[in-house]
Image: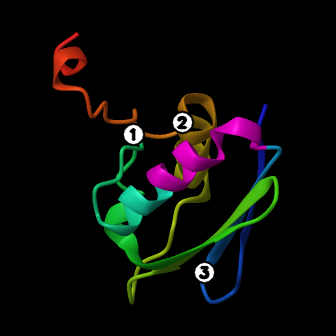
Amino acid sequence: MARYRIAKSPESTVATEVSEVGGQQDRMLAAFASCQAGQCSCPTDEYRKLESISIHRGEDDITVRLEPKEGESFDLSQIAVCLEYVTAHGGPPSEDPDPERAGR
């Protein structure tokens, strides 16, 4: 099961590392990319504070750097809620390109 660490810098930037992601890496990356696009599936509103996000894919880990909008600060407990959601669910479901199965 994936594990994560969260660290906050004095400048309010948050760095997270999700390790032991295994076969969930692509789905987790898709979830983080959705947040980057302002369409976060996490059950928090922290993405509204997001100025920028950088995502780095490692061999069996993902590093995410979150930069808040000016005057904003991330609530680390809510970042943890989002990471719990992403690690438990692996991000948004994949879209099935077969329209016959899409309605099932």
Relative height, residue 45 to residue 16 (above, below): above
Secondary structure beneath dot 3 equals: loop
27 drawn magenta: yes
Q: Residue 60: where, in percent of width, then height?
A: 81, 52
In space, the residues marked 3 and 2 are separated at their CA atoms by 21 Å
Residue with the mark numbered 2 = 85
In space, the residues marked 3 and 1 are separated at their CA atoms by 21 Å
Q: Are marks 1 and 2 in contact (CB under 8 Å)?
A: yes
Q: Main secondary structure of the magenta part?
A: helix
Residue with the mark numbered 3 = 13
Looking at the picture, tell me which residue is in the foreground, 21 or 14: 21
Residue with the mark numbered 1 = 43
Q: Amino acid at mark 1?
A: Pro
Q: Residues within 10 Å of mark 2 (few under 14, many from 20)?
A: some
Q: Amino acid at mark 2?
A: Tyr
The residues colored magenta run: 21-31
Res 51 quadrant in image: bottom left
87 drawn magenta: no
In space, the residues marked 1 and 2 are separated at their CA atoms by 8 Å
Looking at the picture, tell me which residue is in the foreground, 15 or 90: 90
The residue sitting at 51% across, 67% down in the picture is: 74
The residue sitting at 46% across, 52% down in the picture is: 30
